[in-house]
Image (spheres, helix red, strand yellow):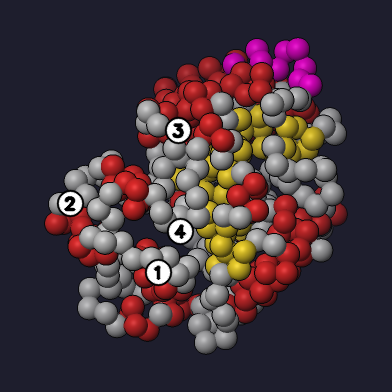
Amino acid sequence: MLREMSDTAELVHSFDGSFDSDMTIEIGLYNGTEYFASLWQLRNLGYYGDPMNITAMKRWGHPAGPEDASEEGVFKLPPFDGPYDLPTSYEAASGRLHYIALNLQRVDVGNPMFGNVTAIFSPSFRKDAVAASPIDSGLYVMGCNKTYMETPGSHAEPKLAKKIACNKGDITPGVTIPTAMDHVLLNNRIFWSKSGGVDTLARAFARTHAEPAHAPAKVTNASSAELIMYIEPNVLANALYSENAIKLLVGSFYALFGSTRGGLLRQFAAARRVALTWAIGACSTGFISDENVSFAGDVRLLDWPTSGAMLNATASPGDATSFAALWDAAADERAHAGGNLTTAAVWRWWAQARSTLSGALRLSLPRPGDCASWERTLGKNEAGECVAYLD
């Protein structure tokens, strides 16, 4: 059962948030290449300043940045050839990885700690391009790797890292085939055994199989404390839109629906021919700092005007018009509110969207047995269709 849950769990990369050298909506829309760029590619291309500037090199390179120690120590990737262990060419930068979280908890918004937009990577990467660390490899390096931690100038140990049972688990990555993932799944549970009673595998099982209508919220809800306890199945390959590397984009309904940036996200999705959905999550901003936040999440709503022509779903005749009207009305209210809506207002718009749009646009997250294949399938809608790309 756990293997099936792991096999169907999404590969998520959340972005457009609080981290200074990640993808943004604008980069996705305006970058002239076919690449969904990685952290090292973005830095090398100069999106976040001159990569040869000494200040940038000190901030991003070893030991101030934990990425090199993680990628070389945990994933055994070869060192870069530049000062501070940084890449000196785009080719070298392209030889590293995309940071990914395994959405084992089936959270509708992906991992909102890292931003208001989530890219769901194609499960086809699992065949030969994924190596999965049992926990966040950066947290492990900053909290468990004594050699790195004792290096002058290394990143300070985060408070959360103190909850890791460093001496009990095995950080060795596994490839995403069932037998190798057994090791990863079990060590994820072992590493977080000090985290105040949170059993990551039991929680994932409850989120997948318990019905919210028949189980208490404490069983079926997700919590922000669990969001950082993810397995990290990083993609060791370039991600090209033209090769369907990104299966789905998920926008935060709270932060972006009806906003100017949300409009850019819709343009990004249309330009790259990637389906777009909207999710409510905890109805909060992308980065959740309060570890006591508990939330149920919900279905994802298909952005039908942007995505409908690409998909096999059978929408109601009025869905496109209704969606456009909802967007325009929410945008008008945001404009009058200075761009931000209250939580109550967002819940009101979410309820209206849910009741106005047909069940064909309401998608559940992947779950074992729901659909025959998840290669190009986004989810099962309330009309019983496994919604997938037409080509």
Is 179 displayed left or right of 129 in the figure?
right
| Residue type for callout 4 | Ser
| Residue type for callout 1 | Glu
In the rendered structure, which segment of residues is drawn in magenta? 314-324
| Total labels drawn | 4
Residue 220 seen anywhere in this rendered image of the structure: no
* Residue at the spot of label 4: 289
* Residue at the spot of label 3: 34
Assess whether residue 322 is covered by the magenta stretch: yes
Query: Contact, CB < 8 Å: mark 3 with mark 2?
Result: no
* Residue at the spot of label 1: 72
* Residue at the spot of label 2: 52
First reached walking from the N terminus: tag 3 or tag 4: 3
Task: Single out the residue that lies furthest toward the bottom.
Answer: 167
The residues tagged by marks 3 and 4 sit, at their Cα atoms, a distance apart of: 34 Å
Mark 2 Cα shell of 10 Å, populated few (<14), some (14-19), many (≥20): some
The residues tagged by marks 4 and 1 sit, at their Cα atoms, a distance apart of: 29 Å
| Residue type for callout 2 | Met
Element type at mark 2: loop
Rendered view: 193 above or below 219: below
First reached walking from the N terminus: tag 3 or tag 2: 3
Task: Kindly report which numbered mark, 3 or 4, lies closer to the viewer in this rendering.
Answer: 3
Comparing 166 with 112, the one in front is: 166
Element type at mark 1: helix
| Residue type for callout 3 | Glu
Rendered view: 194 above or below 46: below
Residue at image position (45%, 58%) is: 289
Quadrant of the drawing holding the C terminus: top right
First reached walking from the N terminus: tag 2 or tag 1: 2
Rendered view: 182 above or below 126: below
The residues tagged by marks 2 and 1 sit, at their Cα atoms, a distance apart of: 21 Å
Residue at image position (67%, 58%) is: 104
